[in-house]
Image (cartoon, helix red, strand yellow):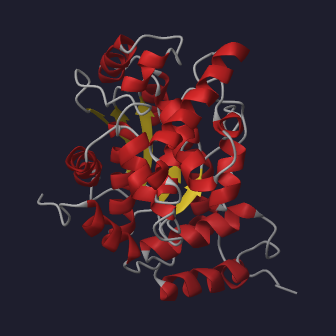
Amino acid sequence: MSLPFTTLLEFSEILKTPSKMNSSAYELASARNEQLTKPVGALGRLEDLALWYAGWRGQERPSLERPQVLIFAGNHGVTAQGISVFPPEVTAQMVLNFETGGAAINQLSGCFGAKLDVHALDLDRPTQDLTEASAMSEDECVQALGVGWTSVDENADLLVTGEMGIGNTTAAAAIALALFGGTGADWAGRGTGLGSEGVALKAQVVEAGLARHSDAKGDGLVSLMSLGGREIAAMAGAIARARVIRIPVILDGFICCAAAATLYAVANDALDHCVAGHLSAEGAHRRLLERLGKEPLLSLGLRLGEGSGGTLAISVLKAAIACHTGMVTFAEAGVSAG
């Protein structure tokens, strides 16, 4: 597939192009919802989810049969600052685990009939240390966006994106700081198990990164290039591609939402096709979701990454769609609507 962008400016123009849900399908689904054998609103957010999904899929009575889970992996030069308890080699080892079916995401994808695809991005060539140089050049960032863009299965009817990358909570925190302000301590968390001293160091590194790249403040794509990582850019590319071809997206945890935030900073409707799958145990995730205007579907204390929380939330969306599509109306059931 040839990419419709070769620069970050061209990618931003795609994000600024309106891509609305099918209003006719949404209205038909809403009318159906009002006639189903239940009080209107009795299923709470399940009703909202079903209508959102129907609108983006363009179907009054949709089904969810072909979900895709995309996992991207990348390595980060900022690990040289001592901000992780695990060495970068773990990234490649976990990718192998994904590929051989041994990880949590393999089990969760199987539970909900999702196709799982894993893409490792230049693991032997980490990004630059964001405190010393731009994490990626523009060409490298565009290439990573392109990997995400071309990885989306056009036949999928739902997308979940996840990641693996030692050091990527630091990159995500730096992006969040650049886009939403505050201090490093507001966005730096324990990641894969840092203690209090490690978190404090991480906060300092995040602030040093933004000081080095002050032009990233408020700029989604500059922050992605200067402070992010290849797997974060790939997630952003996949989310953007899904919007263009009207595939609904379930966002995963803090790192995935940081990737999504880079799109939101360019166009505030760039995430209308997305819902938040869960609230993770990474401390700043709630703050990030609030900035994105997303209410999580689940809150189970997960902090694994891998797309695990987003994939688990497929179950909630499937339930919402099953009720909307499978229930009968009052007229069909011969029940008085009152």
Residue at 48% of width from left, 71% of height from top? 267
Residue visible at 49% across and 66% down in the picture: 273
Could you tell me which residue is drawn at 22 percent across and 61 percent down?
7
Return the residue found at the far right. 338
Q: Quadrant of the C terminus?
A: bottom right
- In this picture, is 307 found above or below 247? above
Q: Nearer the viewer, residue 9 or 234?
A: 9
- The structure residue drawn at horizontal position 36% and vertical position 16%, both measured from the top left corner, is 97
Q: Is residue 32 above or below residue 230?
A: below
**Quadrant position of residue 184:** top right
Left or right: 6 with respect to 152?
left
Residue 31: image location, x then y, percent: 64, 86
Query: From where the camera sits, is residue 308 visible?
Result: no
Q: How many marks?
A: 0
**Is residue 42 toward the left or the right of residue 102 in the image?**
right
Looking at the image, can residue 258 be seen?
A: yes
> Residue 154 sits in which quadrant?
bottom left
Question: Which percent across, then down, holds residue 228?
Answer: 41, 41
Quadrant where the N terminus is found in the figure:
bottom left
Point out residue 175 in the picture as x, y percentages from the top left corner: 51, 45
Residue 103 vs residue 200: left or right?
left
213 or 226: nearer the eye?
213
Considering every residue shown, the one lying at the far left of the view is 2
Quadrant of residue 126 within the rendered picture: top left
Q: Nearer the viewer, residue 265 or 235?
A: 265
On the rendered structure, is 151 left or right of 175? left
Q: Nearer the viewer, residue 277 or 87?
A: 87
Instruction: Give x and y (percent) for residue 256.
Output: 50, 44
